[in-house]
Amino acid sequence: MKTKKVAFLGLCITLAMILSFVESQIPVSVAIPGIKLGLPNLVMTFLLYKVGWKDTVIVSLIRIVLISMLFGNIQTLTFSVAGAIVSLLGMILLKKIDRFSCVAVSVTGGVLHNVGQIIAACLWTQTAQIAFYLPMLLFSGTVAGAVIGLLAGLMLKRFEKWKL
């Protein structure tokens, strides 16, 4: 791997970690636990289009492990990995089809991240009643995913000519 690409991916990990931390500091005054802006998904969506799915998955997993070690616990790690796996699979598949916009790919990621986390929460707590949060999380994932997708699209246009 080229030195320039390794440095770029390192910067992306750092940016995603910073966005994760910033997001954790934003008080969400909603009665539904788990609603977040999905700021790190901005980096993942951008990377998916800029460098491909393999590097995106690596960056995502490194970010999750580091953030869990620094600011979380095993539960944080479990929920984050579950959300990331389901989210990235959906995003990768939609992008591979090549008929969906960056916004649609990001919305899919936001929604599927919530689905993955609800599945993990149901397994963790051994209760299916947590799934009652899903409709509100799907709505918030759609809205956040649309905003993140628009921002990622703008970033992609801005860095269109930049090659790694």
Image (tube, helix red, strand yellow):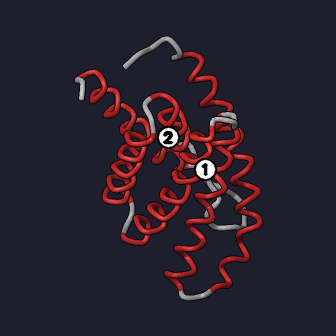
Q: Position of residue 79 (x, y in %)?
A: 48, 67
Q: Is residue 158 above or below residue 61?
A: above
Question: Of marks 2 and 1, which one's residue comes earlier in the chain?
Answer: 2
Which residue type does callout 1 highlight?
Answer: Gly
SS of the residue at dot 2? helix
Residue at (49, 81) in percent of width and height? 124
Neighbour class for label 2 at 10 Å: few (<14), some, many (≥20)?
many
Q: Position of residue 28 (x, y in %)?
A: 65, 55
SS of the residue at dot 1? helix
> Which residue lies under the disc numbered 1?
109
Q: Position of residue 136 (x, y in %)?
A: 76, 64
Instruction: Kindly give the residue lying farthest to the top in the view shown.
Output: 161
Residue at (57, 80) in percent of width and height? 122
Quick one: quadrant of the N terminus?
A: top left
Residue at (62, 58) in percent of width and height? 112
> Which residue lies under the disc numbered 2?
44
The residues tagged by marks 2 and 1 sit, at their Cα atoms, a distance apart of 9 Å
Quick one: quadrant of the C terminus?
A: top left
